[in-house]
Amino acid sequence: MQAPVLVLKDSLTRESGCKVHHANIQASKVVADIIRTTLGPRSMLKMLLDAAGGIVVTNDGNAILRELDIAHPAAKSMIELSRTQDEEVGDGTTSVIVLAGEMLHVAEAFIDKKYHATVICRAYNKALEDALAVLDKIAMSIDVNDRSMMLGLVKSCIGTKFTSQFGDLIADLALDATTIVGVDLGQGLREVDIKKYIKVEKIPGGLLEDSKVLKGVMFNKDVVVPGKMRRKIVNPRIILLDCPLEYKKGENQTNAELVKEEDWGVLLKMEEEYIENLCAQILRFKPDLVITEKGLSDLACHYLSKAGVSAIRRLRKTDNNRIAKACGAVIVNRPDELQESDVGTGAGLFEVKKIGDEFFAYIVDCQDPKACTVLLRGASKDLLNEVERNLQDAMSVARNILKHPKLVPGGGATELTVSATLKQKSSSIEGIEKWPYEAAAVAFEAIPRTLAQNCGVNVIRTMTALQGKHANGENAWTGIDGNSGVIADMKELKIWDAYNVKAQTFKTAIEAACMLLRIDDIVSGIKKKQAPGSTQPSKPTIEQEGDADTEQMIPE
C-alpha cells in the first residue's frame, strides 16, 4: 500500500462540492435577512455601533452593510453588490440583496438534486434576459419637465426612507439640486454630476423645514479681516485664485550677506513691493471679492481691504470649483495671467451670515448656476446624517430619471409581472433548464412578499391574490400599497420606480447569484508572505564577520 501523499499543507482547509454551495447560500441568506426588514415604507431602522463608538441609525441597505464586519467570503461579495448598486444608480440597495438572497435560496433545492451549477446559471441568465424584456414592455416614458410627476416619482422612491414623514421636503430639495446642476451634452443627453457640484452642508440646530437649496454656494469661512472688509456685497465681481498672496520663501536655505544696514531695508521693501504688485494686478480688475485656496499675508490683506475688497483664504479646492461653476469665474493660477473673462459676475449677492456660532459665507442668487449647496438643518447629528443619506438617494433617483425618463410600477408590481410572464414562458422551455428557470420566476416574488411581511398583513393570502391577478395578465400595475398592505393599482397611488434602478437591480442580483453558485471550492488558511517589519520576526540573523564586508558601505 502506498504512503498517503500530502499535497496541501496541514494548515490549509479545503472545502469543495456541495458543502461550499450550501455554505455560500446560507451566508447570503443571512446577509439578506439582516436587511430584509428595511424594505418598503413600513421599514424598520437599524442601529449600528461602529468601532469608534459612534452610532449610525439608518435603513439604507448600503449604509448598514457598509458598517458590518463580516468573516464569510460569500457574504462579503453580497455586500459588494449593494455598494455597486449604490454607486451605479443610488437606489434599490436593499432590494438587490433580498433578490440575490432569494435567487440563491431557490437554487439550493436544485443543488440537492445534483443539478450542475452551470445549468442553473444558464437558466438564470435566460430568465434575466426575459425579465429585462418584460421591463421594457411595461415601462412608460415621462416628461422630465413636468414637475408634479417628477416630485411624485422622487417621493415614491424616498417613501421607504426615514424622511418620508416630512413629505415633499426632501423630494423638493433633491429635484431642485439636480435640475440646477444638470448639464446638457447635446443629443438629448443630460449629465448630472452629484458628487462634484452638489455640496450638502449639515448644520445642527433649527428645524428640518428650514433646509433649502441655495442658488449658489455657501462654505464655512469668514472674510479675513471681519472688521474692515464688507460682509455683504450685491452683484459682486469675484476673482478665484489658486496661488498664495504672500512673499515666496526660498525653497532651500538661502544666506544673504548684508554689507550695509540699508540693505536690510531694501530686502524688506522688495518683499513688500512683490506683494503690492500681486495685489495691484488683482485690483486692476476692480473685484469685490477675492478668494484664494492658499494663504494671504497680512500685507496683502491690508492692500485689498484698503481698496474695499473682501478676501477669503484657504478655501477647499472642491469648494473653489463649485464657486467657479456657480458664478462663472475661472480659477486663475497666477495673478499676472488674470483676464477680464476670468472674473465671475454671475452671482447676485455675497454675504456672511452667522448660523449657530459659526460664520458661513454665501454666494447666492446666481444667474445660471451649475453648482449648488443643499443646506440641511435638523435637531441632532444622527438625524442629519440620515437625512443626508436619504437626500443622496433622492438625488440619484432624480438624476436617473433625467438621464432615462422611463418608469416602472413600484410596490412589487414590476416583480410580480415579471414573475407571471416568466412562469408562462417556462412551459415553452425544453430540457432540464425549465425547472431552474421557473424557480427564478418564483424568486422574483421575494420583493412583494417582503413588502407584505413588513406591513404585517397575511402574507400568504395577499400573495395568492396578487399572483392570481397577475396570472390573468389583466393589469401589470397591481401591487401592494406598502403602508397598509392592501392590494392596489400603483398608477393611482403614484408609486413608481425608475426604470434603470429596476433593471440594474435585476442584473446585479442575478449575476451575483450566478457567480456565487459557480464557486465549488474554498481553500482557506493560505499564509501570507511576511511583510518586512511585521510583528513576529523569523529567527534573528546573526551577522558573521564574513558577511560584514559583502554589504555595500554607505558613502559618507
Image (tube, rainbow, N blue to C red):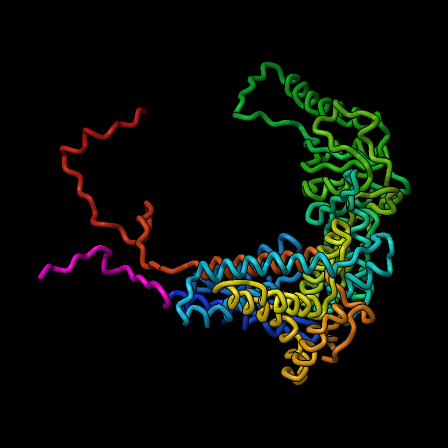
Q: In which quarter of the image is residue 172?
A: bottom right
Residue at image coords 81%, 47%: 216
In this rendered view, identify the residue nearer to me: 389 or 481. Answer: 481
Please, what is the dominant secondary structure of the magenta stretch? loop
Q: In this view, does 220 lie to the left or right of 363?
A: left
Q: Specify the farthest residue to the right.
A: 234
Q: In which quarter of the image is the C terminus?
A: top left
Which x, y percent locates residue 284?
A: 84, 25
Q: Specify the farthest residue to the top.
A: 259
- Residue 81, magenta (yes or no): no
Q: Quadrant of the N terminus?
A: bottom left
In this rendered view, identify the residue nearer to me: 462 or 323. Answer: 462
Which x, y percent locates residue 165?
A: 77, 72
Q: Up-down: is 463 above or below 276?
A: below
Q: Up-down: is 299 above or below 155?
A: above
Is residue 225 something that shows in the picture? no
Q: Quadrant of residue 175?
A: bottom right
Q: In this view, does 444 lie to the left or right of 553?
A: right
Residue at image coords 77%, 39%: 185
Which x, y percent locates residue 311?
A: 78, 38
Q: Is residue 525 left or right of residue 517?
A: left
Q: Up-down: is 200 above or below 551?
A: below
Q: Give the range drawn in magenta.
A: 1-18
Q: In which quarter of the image is residue 451?
A: bottom right
